[in-house]
Image (spheres, rainbow, N blue to C red):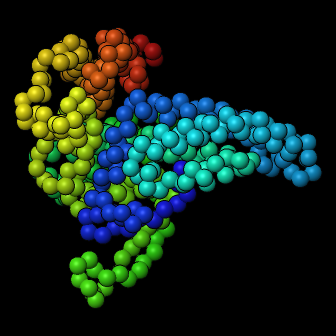
Amino acid sequence: MFERFSVFISGANIEVTGQAFPLGELTADILSIRPKEFQQLQAAADELVKLIDEDNIPTRAVSIVDQEKRNERFRLRERNRPAAAALIKELHSLLLTRRLFQLVAISEKRLQAILQTLTYPSLAKRYLTIVDDIYAFNQTMFWFIDQGLMRLDKLDAAHYAAALHAFYHAPGIDKMMVNFFCFPGRTFNWFDTYEIKFFPREMPGEPGRFAIYEEYAVKDLQAFLKIDFMRALAVGHAIRRCHYCKGFFLLTKGYQTLYCTRPIPENPKFTCRTWREAGKVKESAAGTAERRLCNAAVNRINADKSRGQITAAEADWARFYARELRDQAMADPAEAKTLEARLKPQALYGALEIMKRSEQKNQS
Ligand SMILES: [Zn+2]
């Protein structure tokens, strides 16, 4: 998808390939990848893993003297190449729906050239890492935005930093932060790798006056998302989730708003915000059944918490998940059919690996 690219931060903007964006905007776009879209990425990535694992005989086992094993490996690789190439192209075009990738993606010509060679597995791994990074970053930050940024009374850099501190130290953080133990290969990294260059440049709007600037080169998507999002928080930008379309959007000024300014599919002349202002967002009529089911599930969760059957952190996690299921069901009739079953305590707690205290006693 991309090999390595540089970013440059100046004030409240980030420059990627010479184009400036408000800090956080490109990240909000990646966060807005819908579960349905991610499932497509995931399905292609799973198929690709199967193909490249097949010819993945460890290099040390394939010494120069062991010509036969070498040949076998190349035969497998050659056989799998057309199928792998098709999957890589599919991942490439799915990712190109995002602004960041439109800026930094390798050209079609270069992609085609690499796919002609037998070194395609290393290219395949780059795409797989991107899919893993999207998962690790988005899942973790969904929590931070929902539990932290969306609940603040004051919107400024100091409160965003305090919310991040509270999130990193929350009792249920090991469940919220994607880590190796729940998802092998997928981790929200504590440390990311950057290469950095310092260089002097004229200050914007002040000809003849120079300052020393920093340019960062990133190889991994997660490294980019962290620098874009964390620096965004530091300059007082926040990412919020729209109550109407459920997409993420960037807020550069400190006022409370629950609605974004994207055009709405049913009437593109309106945005979620103007649609709401026009009084068109009917909270009651649409999704009544889904809301009722979700409310009942939330009441059960609260009751389990007050009876000491589950911890406060587990209850937070379960309520969040129940609301996610409700939102998915409201957006998709196929999901709505299974909502009731998925909100039943056994299914809901089972999906989150939460076990009630009474069940823990029975097991021991
Ligand atoms: Zn919206």
| Front-most of residues 313 and 138 | 138
* Residue 97 in picture, x, y percent from top left: 42, 42
Q: For residue 80, which quarter of the picture?
A: top right
Q: Residue furthest bottom?
A: 208
Quadrant assignment, res 151 = top left
227 over 334 or under it: above or below: below
Give the total of numbered labels. 0
* Location of residue 156 in the rendering, given as x and y in whole percent from the top left corner: 16, 56
The residue depicted at 33 percent of the width and 40 percent of the height is 32
**Residue 39 visible somewhere in the drawing:** yes
Residue 299 visible in the picture:
no
Rendered residue at 40%/62% (across/down): 16
Is 118 placed above or below 364 here?
Answer: below
Q: Nearer the viewer, residue 247 or 295?
A: 247
The front one of 25 and 266 is: 266
Q: Is residue 47 above or below residue 73?
A: above
Q: Residue at x 41, y 52 (%)?
A: 100
43 relative to 321 in the view: left or right: right
Tell me residue 148's x, y (percent). 23, 44
Which residue is painted at 57% across and 50% down in the image? 108
- In the figure, is residue 290 to the left or right of 42? left
Q: Position of residue 70 (x, y in %)?
A: 86, 45
As drawn, the residue found furthest toward the front would be 269
